[in-house]
Amino acid sequence: MTSQNSKTYKLLVVDDEDAVHRSYASVLTTAAKPSSDEDLIALEAALFGAQDVQQPFGFTISACKQGDDAVDLVQQSVALAKDCRFSVVFIDMRMPPGMHGMEAANRIHEVDPDIKIVIVTGYSDFTMDQIEMAFPPSADVYYVQKPFDGNAIWTLASALSKDWDGQQLTDTEDQIVVSRFKVRRDAAA
Amino acid sequence: MKLVTKLSILLCSMMVALVGANYLVVNATVMPTFAQLEQKAAKDGVSRVIQALDREKTYLHSMAQDWSFWDDTRNYATTNDESYVKENLMDATFTGLKTEAFFIIGLDGSVKWGQVLDLQEVSPLEVPSLPTKGKWANSALLHAPDATENSVKTGLIMTENGIMVIASAPILTSQNKGPAAGTLMFGRLLTPAKLDELRAQTGVAFELLPANHKVQSNDGSNAGKSVPSGESLLVDNPSSGTIHAFQTLIDVSGKPLITLKATTAKDITKTGQETLITTLLLLTIAGLVLVIGMAALLRKMAISPVLHLTETATRVGETGDLSLRNEIEKDDEIGALAAQFNAMLADLEEAKEQLREQSYYTGVLEMSAGLMHNLRNTLNPIAINAWKSLEVLDRTRLTNFYVALDAISNPETEPEKRDAYLAYIKGAAPSIAEERELLREKIAEIAAETKHVEGILEDHNRLNRPEMCVEQVDLEQVVQRATKQVPAIDGLKIEARIPEEFPLASSNYLLLSQVIGNLMVNSAEAIEAAKVPNGEINLEVELLASDISPRLVITISDNGEGFMSETKTDLFKRGFSTRKEKSGGLGLHWCANTLTAMGGRLSLESDGPGKGAVARIELAASAETIKEAA
């Protein structure tokens, strides 16, 4: 959930499927609730002790369907202040007819070396070793298999954004992100 | 231009060049030698004529000495004793000595006795320049009293009857003592008969021309020149094939007398030219024979094999049929080239086959990858909607709603609390309705995406039916390919019996190869598992003739471990295997499905464990080919 005062990170989703774009939006963004709901929440807290956990940050999502467009978007963002740059890019492997996700990810890393790269694909033409070898050691690369679950994407988006922002990750976040999704585990370790 | 034409032109050019070069070399080196020999022969001819004349002179010189250094002659010169004339100067003396003229002349030049006799007619001749009475005017032949035995003169003089060889000697005592009493002369005319005799003697065709003769020639060389006296002047007459040698002869007083012309036929050059032409002709014939022989040899040894190689390469290029081979069996470089070419074709055929297989598997993999990608992409919204639905359910107000309802119905609930619960129920009801609507929406989306998944699977199924690529397949080739898949096992014997001109099968070459190969691999593994020492896999084909739909039956039997009839159904289940270590084969499930998709059928039979097994494939035969075969 996003409050007006919480920090907002920019995410970039690169996938040729509109349905996948909607999935990211469904997981990472939440519609603002009407003000009348606040009274009910307060009553709910008084009667049942329930508390709505306030997230300290939220996300805005930019989406495109081709690697070229993604590179252009990142190129445009690097000239801006850090708050306006992308913290994480979620990128698909197969996006016909344009360039392959691996190539797009590499070019994005060249344009913005700080950006966290999450490769999200239903079928990879490359083994994990090949993916690892395809990026320079400086690249922070993660891998998620489709169909993904919302928690994984939310955890990755939040943890990697915090890391990108220089914030300390919790042990749980660090463990999940590194053990489950990081491609270059040795380097991370 | 074809290789044969090029080689023929090359060989003919070489032959013409060889003959031409031979002609030029011989013409430039040998022919001048022939000309020099002829010139020398012409000069020698002149010399021989002059030598013959010199011999005449010597003969007369000797006779003159004999007669003039004689006391009887000296006595006659001084006393005019007529007995000397009677005894010695008869006509017989002239004919015997073969000399026409004899003179005894006194010291004052007066003729004491003289006569010129025609030796043929034996009658005196009147020669004005050689008077037989009176005084001689030609003092050059006369000798003075002081002349000695060495003063004898010989030479040629011109008379009205022709050239005469003459010798004059002083008349001395028999002891060759002087003083000289006069001059004695012998003369021999060079009559036509004498000249013919000299020609026969010397072997030179010569003639005597007037002095100061001007040379004429056809080629203009030396034309108009005066003939020297000490040496020969040569004139070539190519048109007549002769060479003339001229030389001026001088008289006794040293003046030019006559021009000797000796004619020599240019036989050497003629013979040389004839020899050269004959040689060149023989060389040409030999060259032609050599060229024809070499051409025939080249055709047999090189050109024909190269043409065969070219034809094979061209046919491969035109038809793309890599099974074509050269039929050249030679142990030379061309044979090695043909063998290498055949090996290359075999490698290419194998590579093409592998590429075809690779393409097939790549295509299958690509299709699988595409399918997986599409499926996972489509499953993604389903998963997210499910996750979202769970989250809604986890955070639902329905639980609190029921607690609030219980609290309201509980009489022990305080009124203030009851009011609060009531307010909550009123406030939460729309929220719960929203949750319900959201869940309905998510479930509807899941249902829609599920339909999408079904669509993807249907498309995949439709696009991947093997019947889409059924072709006319030669079973011989299929079995050859399938046999290569069977692992090498000691003692295993594989025999395939396919009759010649057996009909083609309506199937897919690659898939059928995989199916038969897989069944043969199963048989090999069954034989190995049963530890049969002499394993056998037999493949037979049979045509089930039918006017409607002729069928082919392929049976693959082995003497392996076999199977129990109860397990027959399990054999065709997906993933079923009797082996602990799976060989990585495609499995009977896949084989059966593939054959079904191609309009065929697969069945397995066994009489029980240890009794081997028989796989039976039934396929549609190509009707068209059957007609051709019949």
Image: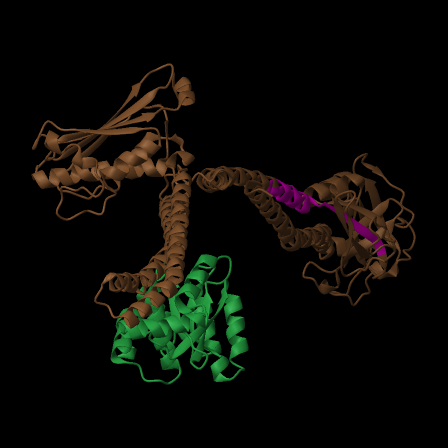
Chain colours: A green, B brown
Location of the C terminus of chain B by quadrant is top left
Query: What x and y, as percent, mark residue B320?
Result: 47, 40
Whole-percent x, y for residue B522 in the image: 19, 39
Task: Give the extent of the magenta segment.
Answer: B257-280
Residue B209 screen position, x and y as percent? 84, 48
Residue B358 % position (x, y)? 36, 48
* Any part of residue B271 in sight: yes
Residue B271 forms part of the magenta stretch: yes
Front in this rendered view, residue B608 or B445: B445
State the residue at coordinates (11%, 31%): B566
- Specify the quadrant of the image occupied by residue B139: bottom right
Residue B122 left/right relative to B589? right
Between B284 and B305, the one lying in front of the other is B305
Instruction: Tell me if residue B279 comes above or below residue B549 in the rendering.
Output: below
Q: Residue at x 85, y 60 (%)?
A: B255
For the N terminus of chain B, the quadrant is top right
Whether residue B559 is situated above or below residue B65 in the rendered picture: above
Tell me the quarter of the picture where residue A37 sits: bottom left
Task: Confirm whether residue B107 shows in the render.
Answer: no
Extreme residue in the top direction: B547
Q: Residue at x 22, y 36 (%)?
A: B519
The residue depicted at 21 percent of the width and 67 percent of the height is: B412
Q: Is residue B629 left or right of residue B7?
A: left
In the image, B272 versus B251, the foreground residue is B272
Q: Is residue B220 magenta?
A: no
B98 sits to left or right of B441: right
Q: Count numbered badges in the picture.
A: 0
